[in-house]
Image (cartoon, rainbow, N blue to C red):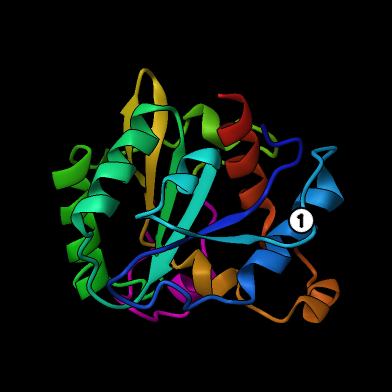
């Protein structure tokens, strides 16, 4: 039984699962800064094909390249969602025509269920901080990737709670900066991650 929250990054056999290596430190700092959640000072890398992944209430997954789950990964992802875990998948390309988006969404549909649009008044957006839907990233506003501002996240829900949350907004680039730079931000762009963690722990 875990007594502290561990920010876990999902490792999978295909693609570049470790494309945002600086992100965990920023999210850990954010959780410690704004909440009373006891958080481990370092994150964990968790293979999806290993049963240990079932221990973590939130798993973060990203990449740029095609995603093809192995049989073991597919089996564990389904078990993870069925048991109440929250798998947060963020497309590091911010491009709905890209290979990560197409293959990751196909894998989730095949493994769990097809993703559907998450309403912007979903409890996730008021789990800690109040948001009117998913925060926009600088990459969307600068016209990178598919040149779209994605107004909704996608999700698979199980028993009225999110089991898989999918983002085309590229939070992976938005949050993947050197931790020393964080104190110079006029607005902390990682606050939405607090909602993800609180929701995963309480919903």
Check the image and report above or below for 190 versus 160: below
Check the image and report above or below for 29 versus 133: below
Any magenta on residue 137? yes
Task: Specify whether residue 152 is in view.
Answer: no
Residue 23 image point, x, y percent = 62, 69
Q: Which residue is mark 1?
A: 30
Q: Main secondary structure of the magenta part?
A: loop
Q: Is residue 171 left or right of residue 80?
A: right
Q: Is residue 71 left or right of residue 8?
A: left
Task: Specify whether residue 93 is in view.
Answer: yes
Q: Secondary structure at mark 1?
A: helix
Residue 156 position by quadrant: top left
Residue 40 image point, x, y percent = 77, 52
Quarter of the C terminus within the rendering? top right
At a point 78% along the width and 47% down the height, the residue shown is 39
Any magenta on residue 33? no
At a point 74% along the width and 57% down the height, the residue shown is 28
Residue 160 position by quadrant: top left
**Residue in the foreground of this view, choosing between 76 and 123:** 76
Residue 185 image point, x, y percent = 78, 73
In this picture, which residue range is highlighted in magenta?
Answer: 134-151
At a point 44% along the width and 71% down the height, the residue shown is 140
Residue 42 image point, x, y percent = 73, 62
């Amino acid at each position: 039984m875990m007594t502290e929250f561990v920010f876990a990054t999902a490792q999978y056999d295909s693609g570049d699962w470790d494309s945002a290596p600086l992100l965990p430190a920023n999210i850990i700092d954010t959780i410690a800064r704004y909440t009373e959640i006891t958080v481990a000072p370092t994150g964990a890398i968790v293979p999806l094909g290993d049963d240990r992944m079932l221990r973590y209430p939130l798993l973060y997954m990203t990449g740029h390249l095609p995603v093809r789950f192995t049989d073991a990964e597919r089996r564990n992802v389904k078990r993870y969602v069925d048991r109440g875990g929250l798998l947060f998948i963020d497309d590091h390309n911010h491009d709905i025509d890209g290979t990560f988006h197409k293959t990751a969404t196909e894998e989730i549909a095949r493994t769990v269920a097809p993703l559907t649009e998450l309403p912007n008044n979903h409890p996730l957006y008021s789990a800690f901080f109040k948001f009117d839907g998913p925060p926009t990233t600088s990459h969307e506003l600068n016209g990178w990737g598919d040149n779209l501002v994605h107004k909704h996240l996608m999700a698979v829900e199980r028993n009225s709670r999110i089991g898989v949350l999918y983002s085309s907004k590229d939070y992976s680039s938005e949050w993947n900066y050197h931790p020393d730079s964080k104190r110079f931000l006029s607005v902390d762009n990682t606050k939405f991650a607090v909602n993800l963690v609180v929701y995963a722990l309480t919903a």
